[in-house]
Amino acid sequence: MLKIPENLCESVTLGIRLEIPITHWQEVVYLAEACKERFLTQSELPELTENEFFMAGLADLAEGYEIERVATDSHTLIFTLDGMGKLTTSQREYALLPGTLAVLPAGLPFRFELAEPGGLWKMAWVLLQDSKKWQPIAVGGQRVEHSYQCERVWSVMNLLHSEVGGRASYRKLFASELSRLLLGTTSLAPSNSQLRVQSLFNEVESQLHLNWTVKGIAERCFLSTEQLNRITRQLYGCSTQQRLIMLRMEKAVDLLCYKEWSVSMVAQRLGYQDPFNFTHRFRHYHGCSPREYRKRLFADS
């Protein structure tokens, strides 16, 4: 049984130092039949890849559960909502209590399991790609922290899971929100302005028929147009106006595959009320007119 010192708050973050450090680790995955787990995968949710998530899951655990890893290529986050888990690292043992976040950077061994064989544990886990984006979270090493984000993370992940096979625009928004929440778990998080811009461009992509302007996007992000353009260049390597054009022109290629839609209809769905303006933009971007592109497309097929 996991022993918890009287000073509970201190034990959560400091854990208990092991008398003998663990040097031998193995790959172990065990779930009792009573365990329930829902997975969020890149194959079902491509928006995870876009936001540099590797995988995630929502778990209600009972009777028996144990995961041991020698090393991983991704960073692991564990948010505890109810019950209790136990985390073991090479040097320490931690009680994973409600309202805590366990951070396990890539490349280091660990084991997490039910604190007691007959106990319960409700938690959400997230695997992050080992990338520059998540470095502020990983830089602090293996640790357990108090976190007020546990319920929010669970809720957003639950919403994201509910959109498997559903609405891409909602998945984009939920994935962006999850990214924002996780980066908010560290004081070293990058600017919220970047996350607002990224989230709004996800919305733009799902509503290209609207009359989007650089000024309007800047206002929605609570930025000046100069700040917006600077952040857009950092994120996408182009200006805000160029990003808008790119989203519309790339979507135009998809819509032109539908023979029953006229060029004028495609133009309107992309926010161009004047089909001649759309044709001019398309020709400048793709090197041919929409009609020429469609003719080549169906000639090849």
Image: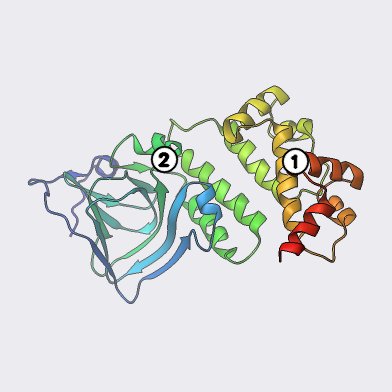
In 3D space, how far apart are the residues under numbered discs 1 and 2 (Cα atoms)? 32 Å
> Residue 29 at x, y = what percent?
27, 65
Give the vertical position of 240 relative to 154 (above or below).
Answer: above
**Picture quadrant of residue 58:** bottom left
Image colouring: rainbow
In the image, what residue occupies the spot 58% across and 34% down? 235
User: Is 260 drawn above or below residue 105 in the view shown?
Assistant: below
State the image coordinates of residue 199 (x, y, percent, origin top left): 63, 43
Q: Nearer the viewer, residue 103 or 46?
A: 46
- Residue plotted at (74% across, 33% down): 241
**73 lies left or right of 45:** left
The three-letter code of the residue at mark 1 reads Tyr
Q: Say what amino acid the circle numbered 2 marks.
A: Ser
- Residue at the far front in the pictured view: 299
> Mark 1 — residue?
285
Q: Are marks 1 and 2 in contact (CB under 8 Å)?
A: no
Element at label 1: helix
The residue positioned 67% from the left and 42% from the top of the image is: 201
Residue at image mark 2:
131
Marks counted in the figure total: 2
Is 282 left or right of 112, judged from the image as shown? right
